[in-house]
Amino acid sequence: MKRRILTAAISTLLIITFTNVGAANNKITVTGQVSDMGNNMPISGVSVSLKGSSIGTKTNSSGYYKVQIEKGSYLVFRHKTYESKTQKVKSNKLNILLKRKTKKENLEKSKNQIGRYSTPATMEMAFCTEQNFATYDKKSAIHYTPKTIIPNINTEEYSSYDENRFKDPKNDPLSTFSLDVDAASYSNARRTINNGHLPSKNSIRIEEMLNYFSYDYKQPKGKDPIKINTEVHTCPWNKKHLLARIGIKAKEISTDKLPASNFVFLLDVSGSMSNANKLPLVKSSLKLLSNNLRPEDRVAIVVYAGAAGVVLESTPGDNKQKILEAMEKLQAGGSTAGGAGIQLAYKIAQKNFKKEGNNRIILCTDGDFNVGISSEKGLEELIEDKRKSGILLTVLGFGMGNYKDNKLQTLSQKGNGNHAYIDNIQEANKVLVNEFGSTMYAVAIDVKLQVEFNPSIVSSYRLVGYESRLLNKEDFNDDTKDAGELGAGHTVTALYEIIPAGTENRYGGIDDLRYQNEQVSDKKIEGNPKEEMMFIKLRYKPIGSNKSKKVEVAVSANINNRATDNFNFIASVAMFSQLLKDSDFKGNAKYDDVLALANKGIGVDKRGYRREFIRLVESVNQMVE
């Protein structure tokens, strides 16, 4: 009898055990992101629970959640300011969009809560929620004033450019553009991806993605402070094409040998700069920069909001206590008079001008100029006029939600300067400490490239990126035409995708011309042009000179045997950028291909920037799966 009871108990235990194992095996880990349906911004603090139970979690600051449940179950998403949503789990990835409650619903909720509070002080606390649905009148315990809710709307602005297309060298043998050393597009894209979203297509400028990274190009050795490096291999996103890399290396100068500087910090302290990733980050960033200042350097601080003013007169760089105290007192508030601030900053920079030194304004803002000179045209004319005085402009962009990339891009390009986007203190350290010389000290200005292609070897070519930097072919020899600057030790990269002669061009092309005959030049040319794929010419002006100098390099049609780490990594960044833009020329590229090529080209990654890139690509790859 006891044996039968024991046998039955063991059988029951086995049934329960195997049932539980089966249930456990049916469980999956579900991850995803909860975002606002109106503006696609992530929502933190959303309760994510299994329907009919208390099992669950909450979304983090980036809107992400992770929970383990059985496949086929229902998850309920709740937040006090959004309509609840119930969703069946069909896979291990579930992204959710929540609809914000109407003002009326939130106001009624606030009214209903009044009965729970008995004093004006506690009633005021009830109304002072994060959404500010109503404000309490302290003079009366029964009256309240509804307050307009300002929705969290993304008003960021980016310029739009048509993508460079393939050109026939028989008809268009010359490609001319200004070098671009900006890198804002990459750090801005990183910020967006880390927040769980794909960046805007217009925010991706391929040349800035490429030039965010430094490459170990050969140093200039002669009298010119610039050296041209080249490399040609098979194009990774279209194996029938070639990819030509042009790398420019500027002369390196140790910090102690850099010329004395006259800096003016021009800081936006308007109300739009109050967020933690704006003015507080500006102050932290400039403290890092101030650590590099020497006794011979000088710095002044100009702020602008409803009006512009001088917070710190030009002060020796070794008086760090006075500089830091001036920055520490800054607070955000008021509207934005950007134009007036810029004019005052130039006035102070001119007053303290160093004839043989480095004169530069460092503008820190989210770009939301809404009072004073606000039009792009007006700002452009102001900066173009002021740059003739020899004062350069560095533009540092901060913040999100209302970031005006288009305005900051215009300012930096017209002011013979550069543009960086600071999304965290690590990026500030990169731009203002690790790359202090290349960011703040120019060794050449108005740097232009002109490439001539050999039609007997090249069927068609296209410049990858640089759409906002294109110049007319006549501009190359015109010393009055503005172009980019190169900082000490800077590396700049440009890529050309090339369709070799005899290869099918599925991107159009033109028929042979009927009336154009080959013209034979009587000019004496060194080397053998018939064996050259292209001829590169670079013009630059030495600092303090209005007359340009020229550097020339011929590129052989022979393909290199093995691609360098630099080439592989650069090609992976270009491929990634084209996928983000959904480029017409992305060919057969996939994110897995980007990862394979980036890992192949990781090389010596002292500061981890290339590995960080790989992590970004992995994140995007998961988003689009």
Image (cartoon, grey):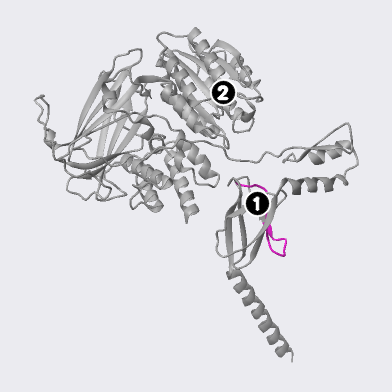
> Considering depth in this image, is 317 or 97 the residue closer to the camera?
97
Residue 577 sits in which quadrant? top left
- Which of marks 2 and 1 precedes in the sequence? 1
In terms of secondary structure, where does tag 1 sit? loop
> Considering depth in this image, is 608 or 453 the residue closer to the camera?
453
- The nearer-to-camera label among 1 and 2 is 1
Residue 57 percent coordinates (x, y): 67, 55
Residue 386 sits in which quadrant? top left
The residue at 51%/44% (across/down) is: 193
Residue 44 highlighted magenta (yes or no): yes
The residue at 54%/28% (across/down) is: 367
For label 1, count other residues whose C-alpha is less than 10 Å away and answer few (under 14), some (14-19) or many (20+). some
Residue 102 highlighted magenta (yes or no): no
* SS majority, magenta: loop
Q: Give the range drawn in magenta.
A: 42-56
Q: Which amino acid does label 1 sit on?
A: Lys
Residue 622 percent coordinates (x, y): 49, 53
Q: Name the residue under label 2.
A: 287
- Answer above or below: position of 184 versus 485: below
Q: What residue type is labelled 2?
A: Lys
The answer to whether 581 appears left or right of 540 in the picture is right
Residue 479 percent coordinates (x, y): 30, 18
> Considering depth in this image, is 190 or 426 the residue closer to the camera?
190
Residue 118 sits in which quadrant? top right
Q: Name the residue under label 1.
A: 99
Separation of marks 1 and 2 at Cα, in angstroms: 41 Å
> Considering depth in this image, is 74 or 159 the residue closer to the camera?
159
Circle count: 2
